[in-house]
Image (cartoon, rainbow, N blue to C red):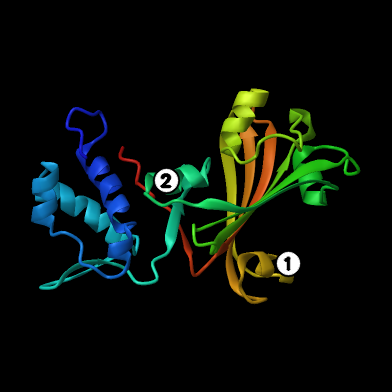
Amino acid sequence: MIDHNSKMPLHAQVEEQMRKLIGMEKYKKGVLLPKEVELANRWGVSRNTIRQATNKLENEGLITRKKGVGTRVAEGKTLSTGLDHWYSFTKEMQEKGIKVINLLLKVEWVKPSAKISTFFNCDPDKLVLKLSKLKGEMSGQPIVLFESYFHPRIGVHEKDDFSKPLYELLEARYGVIVTRSKENISAQAATASVAKKLKVSVDFPLLFRERFVYDAGDRPVEYNVGYYRSDKFTYSIDIRKNQK
């Protein structure tokens, strides 16, 4: 429910509740969402506050509205993420009321590529730890494949509990606090190995995200890539003009 004494703005709380609402099974099946006036009365907020949240969800392609009919969850809706949530995919999905699980978790020592050894500024013959995480829906449908490589300086071990949120693990166990991420985003065709994991055909169009992660001292911590199914995911960027 909405906490009117909370420091969180009402529109943010309403948006959070709306995301939980559209994640409910009956609404996924096409049942009309409650009307704005009904939600306003239920949560004790104005209709403008409800509309502010529904406008955002509609812009994200998560709901559709038809005059004289009502509001429904969009068919074939895709998940979305933003640059402000680079630190935790799972946590962001939880905030939207969407539960994702690890469908595959693999840890191995590998020889770094030239790009990784240059980023880490380490011996190209020195093995680095690679973590692969395949995340998806409760039904077992995959959404994204993440591959992370860690700087040898940190001391990350293959026996660490990688089922926990990654950056929380690095901070709690190794005292490493990540503060900056540099991103490259592009389109890429699925290779045979990636296609098999994501359950798509070879050459299926993927959203490819490359990430360079640094700590407070601007030292490299992690090189990470993500292969997102383009039919399941949208990478959104919210840009605001600096008012001067």
User: Pointer 2: what residue?
Assistant: 94
Query: On the rendered structure, is 180 left or right of 197?
Result: left
Q: Is residue 71 visible?
A: yes
Q: Quadrant of residue 21?
A: bottom left
x, y (%) of residue 126?
Answer: 88, 40
What number of labels is visible? 2
x, y (%) of residue 79?
Answer: 43, 59
Q: Relative to 83, is 190 above or below?
A: below
**Picture residue at 31% right of the left edge, 69% below the top:** 29
Q: Earlier in the sequence, mark 2 or mark 1?
A: 2
Q: Nearer the viewer, residue 3 or 48?
A: 3
Q: Residues within 10 Å of mark 1 (few under 14, many from 20)?
A: few
**Picture residue at 71% right of the left edge, 70% below the top:** 191
Q: Relative to 60, is 118 above or below?
A: above
x, y (%) of residue 7?
Answer: 25, 28
What amino acid type should be assigned to the residue bearing mark 1?
Ser
